[in-house]
Image (cartoon, rainbow, N blue to C red):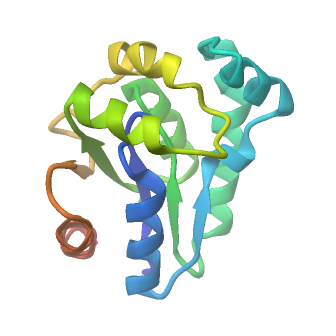
Amino acid sequence: MTPLIVVAGVSGAGKSTIGLAVAEQLGIPFADADSLHSAENVAKMAGGTPLTDEDRAPWLVRIGVELQQGRNDGLVLACSALRRRYRDTIREAAPDTFFVTLTGSRSLLEKRLGARTNHFMSAALLDSQLAAFEPLDPDERGISLSIDADVPTLVAQTVAAATASR
């Protein structure tokens, strides 16, 4: 069975960096859920307006479809998946999904966001994302990792945990 992995966390946590490196190591495709947002959602976030659950609902459906389509070849998907109910919606479409939540200090996240260019996500939304974030519950298939570790360590931990869980 090929892995379906969602690398989750707030903006600036390193979802795309870690997700892409994990996909390369496993030899499977990588996708970023940011590309699945509607133009309206992108405009809201770029303007500093947090998305509502209503805004996110069609996006979560598209994420589920993306993961379903990745079942044969495997897929690593970077996606905020901040709340348990969002992860549950994703799992309804793709029950075998393994979640990796990346967590870090506010100061480190702010530093990363300040250094980032060419991304629609406003750094002003960090507070709302941190407030919305719900850590993985013990019954959720996944692992939580601190972004204080370096990229190779996070990739190795992700690959080991996702591989062991299959």
Query: Where, by quadrant of the figure, is residue 133 drawn?
Result: top left
Q: Is residue 72 left or right of residue 110?
A: right
Q: Residue at x 37, y 63 (%)?
A: 18
Q: Quadrant of the N terminus?
A: bottom left
User: Looking at this rendering, what residue extends furthest in the front direction?
Assistant: 115
- In the image, 73 versus 12, the foreground residue is 12
Between 158 and 96, the one nearer to me in the picture: 158
Percent from the top left, x then y, of residue 2?
45, 79
Q: Is residue 163 above or below residue 57?
A: below
Image quarter in which the C terminus is found: bottom left
Residue at x 42% of width, y 52% of height? 15
The answer to whether residue 24 is above or below residue 39 is below
Q: Is residue 18 visible?
A: yes
In which quadrant of the rendered view does residue 40 lie? top right
- Residue drawn at x 17%, y 70% is 153
Say if 53 sits above or below 134 in the image. Answer: above
* Residue 41 rendering spot, x and y as whole percentages: 75, 25
Tell which of 116 and 41 is nearer to you: 116
Q: Is residue 135 visible?
A: no
Q: Is residue 75 left or right of residue 55?
A: left
